[in-house]
Amino acid sequence: MDDILFRHTASATPNDKSDDFLKRIAESDSDKALVKEAKQFDADLKALLKVDVPEGLADKILLEQSFTVEKERVMNGRWHIAIAASVAFIIGISLPLLNNITHSPADIGEVAMQHVQAEYYFTAKSNEHADLNMVNAKLARYGAQAHSDLGNVTYVNYCSFEGTPALHMVMQGEKGQITVFVVPSDADFIETKSFNNQYLKGITEKMGDANVVIVGERDESLQNVHSAMKNNIQWDI
């Protein structure tokens, strides 16, 4: 179990009983302390949320509601007209302003790293054993077809890449998982050739009518996957 998956598991499910998780705790005092802290946080949160309900509270709420229902019924008719007029006025003055706002495109590398980190816990435990036919069924949407093996593909599907339909493929690298996004080149993103953060790094290259974004952990080599995507796929079918 690598560091990112361990931290996700410790934070989300500190009572996890999987062998890999328990092994990490047994081998590292710092990991053991992290899990202990997460368990204590869960216990403190449960204690805070445990609030005794005052006796007769439900009856008091129902009684108060019965007094207000009739009043609201009378008032609603008047408010509907006033609200409709207000909404129409706001829309009328807002549309010209909205049309003048300049849209600022997102950085494709930042979006890719955020996407990988958000779905890491799910994709790390997924293994579809995707073959060439499964991969090509998804690639066809982007005018591409793989003519030889791309490697050990554990996950392949479509995703929403900051609102843009994209291909999300996960492959097994030398150190951990490598994620590949195939994003239409006409999508509105700032195209960065290389990028990184504290845990991840990545590269972007235009292939056919798509931007191929490859993301892996900082000590992972991305060259083999980059070569496979560039040389083993026909991008203009």
Image: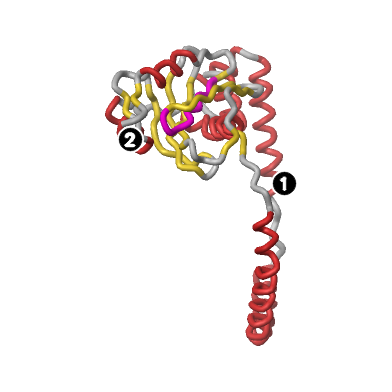
Q: Nearer the viewer, residue 43 or 132?
A: 132
Q: Residue furthest bottom?
A: 74
Q: Residue at x 68, y 17 (%)?
A: 30
Asked if residue 209 is among those painted magenta in the image, a careful observer would answer yes
Question: What is the secondary structure assignment of the residue under circle 1?
Answer: helix
Q: Nearer the viewer, residue 109 or 198?
A: 109
Which image quadrant is residue 226 in? top left
Which image quadrant is residue 131 in? top left
Query: Which region is colored magenta?
Result: 208-216
Q: Earlier in the sequence, mark 1 or mark 2?
A: 1
Residue 215 in percent (x, y) is at 53, 24
Residue 9 in percent (x, y) is at 56, 29
Q: Is residue 124 at least partly visible in the picture?
A: no
- Answer left or right for 7 relative to 51: left
- Answer left or right for 201 relative to 210: right
Spatial separation of the CA atoms under disc 1 and disc 2: 52 Å
Asked if residue 32 is among those painted magenta in the image, a careful observer would answer no
| Residue that numbered label 2 is attached to | 140
In the rendered structure, which amino acid carries the disc numbered 2? Ala
Location of the C terminus by quadrant is: top left
- Which color scheme is applied? secondary structure
